[in-house]
Image: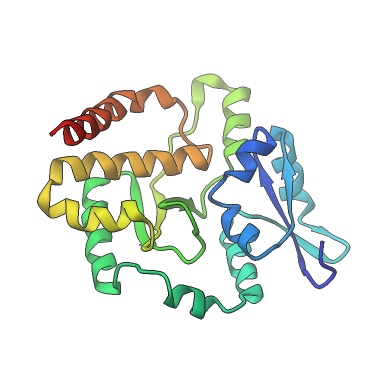
Protein backbone atom coordinates (compact mmCIF):
# COMPACT_ATOMS: atom_id res chain seq x y z
CA UNK A 1 0.00 0.00 0.00
CA UNK A 2 0.97 3.67 -0.24
CA UNK A 3 3.59 4.34 2.48
CA UNK A 4 1.74 7.57 3.30
CA UNK A 5 -1.38 5.61 4.22
CA UNK A 6 -1.49 5.77 8.01
CA UNK A 7 -3.94 2.90 8.57
CA UNK A 8 -4.32 -0.72 7.58
CA UNK A 9 -7.90 -1.20 6.42
CA UNK A 10 -9.47 -4.65 6.31
CA UNK A 11 -12.74 -6.28 5.29
CA UNK A 12 -14.00 -9.68 6.43
CA UNK A 13 -16.04 -11.56 3.81
CA UNK A 14 -16.66 -15.20 2.78
CA UNK A 15 -14.69 -14.74 -0.46
CA UNK A 16 -13.04 -12.16 -2.73
CA UNK A 17 -16.05 -11.70 -5.01
CA UNK A 18 -18.30 -10.76 -2.09
CA UNK A 19 -15.59 -8.50 -0.64
CA UNK A 20 -15.15 -6.61 -3.92
CA UNK A 21 -18.91 -6.07 -4.26
CA UNK A 22 -19.35 -4.94 -0.64
CA UNK A 23 -20.81 -1.43 -0.22
CA UNK A 24 -18.27 -0.87 2.56
CA UNK A 25 -15.45 -1.27 0.02
CA UNK A 26 -16.84 1.30 -2.46
CA UNK A 27 -15.36 4.44 -0.92
CA UNK A 28 -11.93 2.88 -0.42
CA UNK A 29 -11.84 1.60 -3.98
CA UNK A 30 -12.87 5.00 -5.38
CA UNK A 31 -10.00 6.64 -3.45
CA UNK A 32 -7.55 3.90 -4.51
CA UNK A 33 -6.86 2.80 -0.92
CA UNK A 34 -5.64 -0.70 -0.25
CA UNK A 35 -7.94 -2.96 1.78
CA UNK A 36 -6.90 -6.31 3.21
CA UNK A 37 -9.49 -9.01 2.46
CA UNK A 38 -9.91 -11.68 5.16
CA UNK A 39 -11.99 -14.81 4.69
CA UNK A 40 -12.32 -16.70 7.99
CA UNK A 41 -14.42 -15.91 11.05
CA UNK A 42 -11.36 -15.98 13.30
CA UNK A 43 -9.68 -13.19 11.30
CA UNK A 44 -12.02 -10.51 12.63
CA UNK A 45 -11.36 -11.61 16.21
CA UNK A 46 -7.58 -11.51 15.60
CA UNK A 47 -7.63 -8.06 13.95
CA UNK A 48 -9.82 -6.59 16.69
CA UNK A 49 -7.31 -7.71 19.29
CA UNK A 50 -4.18 -6.88 17.30
CA UNK A 51 -5.37 -3.28 16.73
CA UNK A 52 -1.99 -2.01 15.45
CA UNK A 53 0.93 -3.14 13.29
CA UNK A 54 4.17 -1.18 12.82
CA UNK A 55 2.53 1.91 14.34
CA UNK A 56 -0.34 1.74 11.85
CA UNK A 57 -3.86 1.37 13.24
CA UNK A 58 -5.80 -1.64 11.99
CA UNK A 59 -9.38 -0.62 11.11
CA UNK A 60 -12.35 -2.51 9.72
CA UNK A 61 -13.81 -0.67 6.70
CA UNK A 62 -17.22 -1.17 8.32
CA UNK A 63 -16.29 1.00 11.31
CA UNK A 64 -16.89 4.70 11.81
CA UNK A 65 -13.19 5.02 12.69
CA UNK A 66 -12.28 3.88 9.16
CA UNK A 67 -14.82 6.29 7.71
CA UNK A 68 -13.26 9.17 9.63
CA UNK A 69 -9.74 8.11 8.63
CA UNK A 70 -10.73 7.94 4.96
CA UNK A 71 -11.83 11.59 4.97
CA UNK A 72 -8.17 12.58 5.23
CA UNK A 73 -7.65 11.22 1.75
CA UNK A 74 -10.54 13.02 0.05
CA UNK A 75 -9.56 14.47 -3.32
CA UNK A 76 -11.86 16.90 -5.13
CA UNK A 77 -14.82 15.47 -3.20
CA UNK A 78 -16.84 18.67 -3.37
CA UNK A 79 -16.40 18.91 -7.14
CA UNK A 80 -17.49 15.29 -7.61
CA UNK A 81 -20.53 15.75 -5.38
CA UNK A 82 -21.49 18.98 -7.12
CA UNK A 83 -21.96 17.12 -10.40
CA UNK A 84 -24.11 14.37 -8.89
CA UNK A 85 -27.85 14.94 -8.66
CA UNK A 86 -29.14 14.07 -5.22
CA UNK A 87 -31.94 14.80 -2.79
CA UNK A 88 -31.80 18.09 -0.93
CA UNK A 89 -31.08 18.17 2.80
CA UNK A 90 -34.76 18.80 3.53
CA UNK A 91 -35.91 15.97 1.24
CA UNK A 92 -33.45 13.60 2.88
CA UNK A 93 -34.56 14.65 6.35
CA UNK A 94 -38.23 14.07 5.52
CA UNK A 95 -37.50 10.74 3.83
CA UNK A 96 -35.33 9.56 6.73
CA UNK A 97 -38.09 10.39 9.21
CA UNK A 98 -40.64 8.47 7.12
CA UNK A 99 -38.30 5.46 6.74
CA UNK A 100 -37.68 5.44 10.48
CA UNK A 101 -41.42 5.16 11.07
CA UNK A 102 -41.58 2.23 8.63
CA UNK A 103 -38.61 0.54 10.30
CA UNK A 104 -39.76 1.26 13.85
CA UNK A 105 -38.07 -1.09 16.31
CA UNK A 106 -35.34 -1.94 13.79
CA UNK A 107 -33.30 1.27 13.47
CA UNK A 108 -32.07 3.81 15.98
CA UNK A 109 -31.16 6.42 13.37
CA UNK A 110 -31.21 7.09 9.62
CA UNK A 111 -28.75 9.63 8.25
CA UNK A 112 -27.22 10.67 4.93
CA UNK A 113 -24.14 8.71 3.89
CA UNK A 114 -20.97 10.34 2.60
CA UNK A 115 -19.18 7.06 1.91
CA UNK A 116 -21.49 5.26 -0.56
CA UNK A 117 -20.89 5.31 -4.30
CA UNK A 118 -23.14 2.75 -5.97
CA UNK A 119 -25.28 1.33 -3.13
CA UNK A 120 -28.47 2.81 -1.66
CA UNK A 121 -27.81 2.16 2.04
CA UNK A 122 -25.54 0.55 4.63
CA UNK A 123 -25.58 -0.35 8.31
CA UNK A 124 -22.87 1.53 10.24
CA UNK A 125 -21.03 1.19 13.54
CA UNK A 126 -22.51 -2.27 14.07
CA UNK A 127 -21.32 -5.33 15.91
CA UNK A 128 -18.98 -7.60 13.99
CA UNK A 129 -20.82 -10.20 11.92
CA UNK A 130 -17.94 -12.63 12.48
CA UNK A 131 -18.11 -12.20 16.24
CA UNK A 132 -21.88 -12.65 16.13
CA UNK A 133 -21.48 -15.91 14.18
CA UNK A 134 -18.82 -17.13 16.61
CA UNK A 135 -21.10 -16.47 19.58
CA UNK A 136 -23.89 -18.36 17.83
CA UNK A 137 -21.51 -21.23 17.09
CA UNK A 138 -20.44 -21.46 20.75
CA UNK A 139 -24.06 -21.62 21.93
CA UNK A 140 -26.67 -21.94 19.12
CA UNK A 141 -29.51 -21.79 21.66
CA UNK A 142 -28.53 -18.31 22.83
CA UNK A 143 -28.02 -16.34 19.63
CA UNK A 144 -27.83 -12.64 20.54
CA UNK A 145 -30.87 -10.60 19.57
CA UNK A 146 -30.16 -8.07 16.84
CA UNK A 147 -30.20 -4.56 18.37
CA UNK A 148 -31.50 -1.45 16.63
CA UNK A 149 -29.17 -0.46 13.82
CA UNK A 150 -27.82 2.82 12.46
CA UNK A 151 -28.70 3.16 8.78
CA UNK A 152 -27.02 5.49 6.30
CA UNK A 153 -28.75 6.26 2.98
CA UNK A 154 -27.27 7.47 -0.30
CA UNK A 155 -29.12 10.59 -1.50
CA UNK A 156 -27.65 10.16 -5.00
CA UNK A 157 -28.93 6.61 -5.53
CA UNK A 158 -31.94 6.07 -7.82
CA UNK A 159 -33.75 3.88 -5.26
CA UNK A 160 -33.47 6.49 -2.49
CA UNK A 161 -34.45 9.33 -4.83
CA UNK A 162 -37.39 7.26 -6.06
CA UNK A 163 -38.50 6.53 -2.51
CA UNK A 164 -38.79 10.27 -1.82
CA UNK A 165 -41.60 10.42 -4.38
CA UNK A 166 -43.01 6.91 -3.99
CA UNK A 167 -43.74 7.35 -0.27
CA UNK A 168 -46.52 9.80 -1.18
CA UNK A 169 -47.72 8.32 -4.51
CA UNK A 170 -47.69 4.66 -3.45
CA UNK A 171 -46.93 4.26 0.28
CA UNK A 172 -47.63 0.51 0.27
CA UNK A 173 -45.00 -0.17 -2.38
CA UNK A 174 -42.64 2.36 -0.78
CA UNK A 175 -42.91 0.45 2.50
CA UNK A 176 -41.93 -2.81 0.77
CA UNK A 177 -38.96 -1.11 -0.89
CA UNK A 178 -37.82 0.47 2.39
CA UNK A 179 -37.97 -2.86 4.22
CA UNK A 180 -36.02 -4.51 1.40
CA UNK A 181 -33.37 -1.77 1.38
CA UNK A 182 -32.90 -2.28 5.12
CA UNK A 183 -32.67 -6.07 4.84
CA UNK A 184 -30.22 -5.72 1.93
CA UNK A 185 -28.07 -3.55 4.20
CA UNK A 186 -28.24 -6.25 6.90
CA UNK A 187 -27.14 -8.86 4.34
CA UNK A 188 -24.20 -6.67 3.26
CA UNK A 189 -23.19 -6.35 6.93
CA UNK A 190 -23.57 -10.11 7.45
CA UNK A 191 -26.23 -9.54 10.11
CA UNK A 192 -29.28 -11.25 8.56
CA UNK A 193 -29.42 -14.68 10.17
CA UNK A 194 -31.83 -16.26 7.67
CA UNK A 195 -32.37 -14.64 4.27
CA UNK A 196 -35.40 -16.86 3.59
CA UNK A 197 -37.60 -14.52 5.62
CA UNK A 198 -37.38 -11.86 2.90
CA UNK A 199 -38.59 -14.11 0.05
CA UNK A 200 -42.32 -13.22 0.38
CA UNK A 201 -41.46 -9.51 0.15
CA UNK A 202 -39.22 -10.07 -2.86
CA UNK A 203 -42.08 -11.91 -4.56
CA UNK A 204 -44.39 -8.95 -3.82
CA UNK A 205 -41.83 -6.54 -5.31
CA UNK A 206 -41.45 -8.74 -8.41
CA UNK A 207 -45.23 -8.86 -8.78
CA UNK A 208 -45.37 -5.06 -8.67
CA UNK A 209 -42.55 -4.81 -11.19
CA UNK A 210 -44.26 -7.22 -13.59
CA UNK A 211 -47.57 -5.40 -13.17
CA UNK A 212 -45.99 -2.06 -14.04
CA UNK A 213 -44.25 -3.59 -17.06
CA UNK A 214 -47.39 -5.15 -18.53
CA UNK A 215 -49.66 -2.17 -17.96
Q: Position of residue 130 (x, y in %)?
A: 62, 37
Task: Work out whether residue 135 or residue 26 is closer to the camera in this orientation and state it.
Answer: 26
- How many numbered dots are placed on residues in this image? 0
Q: Is residue 92 left or right of residue 149?
A: left
- Residue at the image position 18 percent from the left and 57 percent from the top: 165
Which quadrant: the N terminus? bottom right
Q: Is residue 145 left or right of residue 90?
A: right
As drawn, which residue projects farthest toward the right?
Answer: 54
Q: Position of residue 93 (x, y in %)?
A: 27, 67
- Residue at the image position 52 percent from the left and 55 percent from the top: 125
- Residue at the image position 30 percent from the left and 67 percent from the top: 87
Task: Work out whether residue 50 or residue 90 is closer to the camera in this orientation and state it.
Answer: 90
- Residue at the image position 53 percent from the left and 50 percent from the top: 23
Task: Work out whether residue 97 or residue 119 is closer to the camera in this orientation and state it.
Answer: 119
As drawn, which residue projects farthest toward the front?
Answer: 214
Task: Work out whether residue 142 or residue 204 is closer to the camera in this orientation and state it.
Answer: 204
Q: Which of the 4 image quarters holds residue 75?
A: bottom right
Q: Position of residue 164 (x, y in %)?
A: 22, 58
Q: Position of residue 10 (x, y in %)?
A: 71, 51
Q: Is residue 176 left or right of residue 18?
A: left
As drawn, which residue projects farthest toward the top?
Answer: 141
Which quadrant: the C terminus? top left
Amino acid sequence: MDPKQEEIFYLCAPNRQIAESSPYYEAFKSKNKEVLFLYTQLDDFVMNNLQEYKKKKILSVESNAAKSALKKYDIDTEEKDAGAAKLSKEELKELAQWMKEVLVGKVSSITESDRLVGSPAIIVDHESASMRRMMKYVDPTRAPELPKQQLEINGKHAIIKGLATLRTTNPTLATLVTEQVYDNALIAAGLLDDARIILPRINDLLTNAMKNTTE
